Amino acid sequence: MKYFFIVLTLGLFGNAVKAQSAEDSIKMVINKMFTAFKNSDAEMLKSTFSDSIVFQSIGRNKDGKMIVRNENVDGFVKQIGAAVKGSLDERIVFETIKVDGPLAFAWTPYSFYYNKNFSHCGVNSFQLVRFDGDWKIQSIIDTRRKDNCIVDQ
């Protein structure tokens, strides 16, 4: 009878204690990054990044030519930390996640709101690396536009 209850307990709660998947861990670190945005928490934000993170945005210059702009990571972190808490809200959808060992890719369409007003939308492309069991964001490149948004406005 004792063994019956052990087997029943394991059967009922076995799924609850199942190890977190790589995909869930990747979503967790990306969501943590956006929680840091909302909370204007520079330290939390930095904790999601690798030591050699690269930030880039695709856009047009003043002449209308398509360019890739490299962003200053320290400046970005400072800007997030200095924002009024709750003023930054990036809403994402996890469309695609791919994993190969310690390397992962996540494609997340987004809409960005500043002080609860729609600002722009686009897609984030994340590259992540697993260091000692923890996923860190290695690079982010994004697009930005005002229309044809996938995530609800």
Image (tube, grey):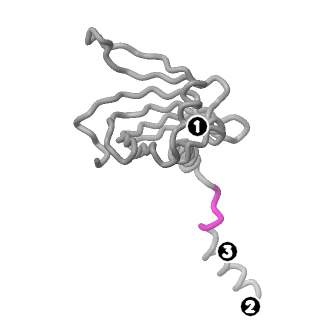
**Residue, x 64% and y 69% (percent of image)?**
14
Q: Which mark is residue 10?
A: 3
Mark 1 — residue?
Answer: 81
Compared with 94, 58 (above or below) is above
Q: Say which mark, if any, is on residue 56.
A: none
Q: Check residue 146 for magenta coloring.
A: no
Q: Quadrant of residue 4?
A: bottom right
Q: Position of residue 17 (x, y in %)?
A: 65, 65
**Which residue is located at x 68 percent, y 79 percent?**
7
Image coordinates of residue 75 in percent, x first then y, are 56, 24
CA–CA distance between discs 2 and 3?
15 Å
Q: Earlier in the sequence, mark 1 or mark 3?
A: 3
Residue 123 in view, yes or no: yes
Callout 1 amino acid: Gly
In the displayed image of the protein, which residue is found farthest to the bottom?
Answer: 1
Badge 2 marks a residue whose secondary structure is: loop
Crowd rating for badge 2 (residues with CA inside 10 Å; few <14, some 14–19, many 20+) = few
Q: Secondary structure at mark 3?
A: helix
Q: Nearer the viewer, residue 21 or 128?
A: 128
Q: What separation in Å lies between label 1 and label 2 (alpha carbons)? A: 58 Å
CA distance separating discs 1 and 3: 45 Å
Q: Given the image, on which type of amino acid does mark 2 rest?
A: Met
Residue, disc 2: 1
Residue at the spot 52% in from the left edge and 39% down from the top edge: 83
> From the viewer's perspective, is the residue at label 1 or at label 2 nearer?
1
Q: Is residue 78 left or right of residue 70?
A: right
Q: Amino acid at mark 3?
A: Leu
Residue segment shown in magenta: 15-19
The quadrant in which residue 129 appears is top right
Secondary structure mostly seen in magenta is loop
Above or below for 109 versus 24: above
